[in-house]
Amino acid sequence: MVKKPSRILIVDDEPEITLAFQKGLRDRGFLTVDTVNDPHLALSSFQAG
Protein backbone atom coordinates (compact mmCIF):
# COMPACT_ATOMS: atom_id res chain seq x y z
CA MET A 1 0.00 0.00 0.00
CA VAL A 2 1.35 3.42 -0.99
CA LYS A 3 1.11 6.15 1.61
CA LYS A 4 -0.37 9.27 0.05
CA PRO A 5 1.05 12.67 1.02
CA SER A 6 -1.23 14.81 3.11
CA ARG A 7 -0.98 17.78 0.75
CA ILE A 8 -0.13 18.34 -2.91
CA LEU A 9 0.52 21.65 -4.69
CA ILE A 10 0.09 21.82 -8.47
CA VAL A 11 1.45 24.86 -10.32
CA ASP A 12 0.69 25.51 -13.98
CA ASP A 13 -0.25 28.58 -15.97
CA GLU A 14 -3.27 26.84 -17.51
CA PRO A 15 -6.27 26.67 -15.15
CA GLU A 16 -7.81 23.77 -17.10
CA ILE A 17 -4.67 21.69 -16.58
CA THR A 18 -4.50 22.29 -12.84
CA LEU A 19 -8.19 21.53 -12.42
CA ALA A 20 -7.85 18.27 -14.37
CA PHE A 21 -4.92 17.15 -12.21
CA GLN A 22 -6.76 18.22 -9.05
CA LYS A 23 -9.86 16.23 -9.97
CA GLY A 24 -7.84 13.16 -10.98
CA LEU A 25 -5.86 13.15 -7.74
CA ARG A 26 -8.94 13.69 -5.57
CA ASP A 27 -10.69 10.84 -7.39
CA ARG A 28 -7.73 8.65 -6.37
CA GLY A 29 -7.96 9.51 -2.69
CA PHE A 30 -5.73 12.55 -2.28
CA LEU A 31 -7.71 14.86 0.00
CA THR A 32 -5.82 18.14 -0.13
CA VAL A 33 -4.80 19.16 -3.62
CA ASP A 34 -4.07 22.87 -3.98
CA THR A 35 -3.68 24.53 -7.36
CA VAL A 36 -2.02 27.80 -8.31
CA ASN A 37 -1.82 29.36 -11.76
CA ASP A 38 0.73 32.06 -10.95
CA PRO A 39 4.25 30.86 -10.14
CA HIS A 40 5.07 33.98 -8.13
CA LEU A 41 2.02 33.40 -5.94
CA ALA A 42 2.99 29.76 -5.53
CA LEU A 43 6.48 30.66 -4.33
CA SER A 44 5.25 33.34 -1.95
CA SER A 45 2.61 31.08 -0.38
CA PHE A 46 4.73 27.90 -0.17
CA GLN A 47 5.67 26.69 3.30
CA ALA A 48 7.85 23.66 3.79
CA GLY A 49 6.35 20.83 5.79
Image (tube, grey):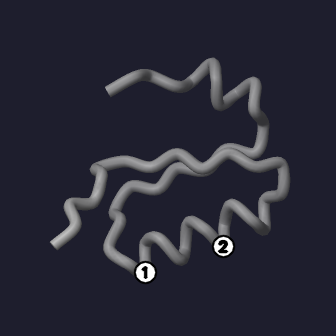
The dot on residue 10 is: none
Residue type marked 2: Ala
**Callout 1: few (<14), some (14-19), or many (20+) C-alpha neighbours within 10 Å?**
few
The quadrant in which residue 11 appears is: top right
> In the figure, is residue 45 to the left or right of 6?
right
Q: Nearer the viewer, residue 42 or 1?
A: 1
| Above or below 48: residue 33 | below
Say if mark 2 contacts mark 1, CB within 8 Å.
no
> In the figure, is residue 31 to the left or right of 14?
left
> In the figure, is residue 25 to the left or right of 13?
left
Residue at point 75% right, 32% down? 39
Of labels 2 and 1, earlier in sequence is 2
Residue at point 44% right, 22% down? 47
Residue at point 15% right, 73% down? 1
- Location of the C terminus (image quadrant): top left
Question: What is the distance, in whole Å, between disc 2 and disc 1 at their CAs?
Answer: 11 Å
Across and down, in percent, residue 41 comes to 70, 27
Residue at point 56% right, 24% down? 45
Q: Nearer the viewer, residue 45 or 21?
A: 21
| Most distant residue in the right direction | 14
Residue located beneath label 2 in the image: 20
The dot on residue 27 is: 1
Q: Secondary structure at mark 2?
A: helix
**Callout 2: few (<14), some (14-19), or many (20+) C-alpha neighbours within 10 Å?**
few
| Above or below 12: residue 43 | above
Q: Secondary structure at mark 1?
A: helix
Across and down, in percent, residue 4 comes to 27, 60
| Most distant residue in the front direction | 1
Across and down, in percent, residue 31 comes to 34, 63
Residue type marked 1: Asp
| Above or below 38: residue 6 | below
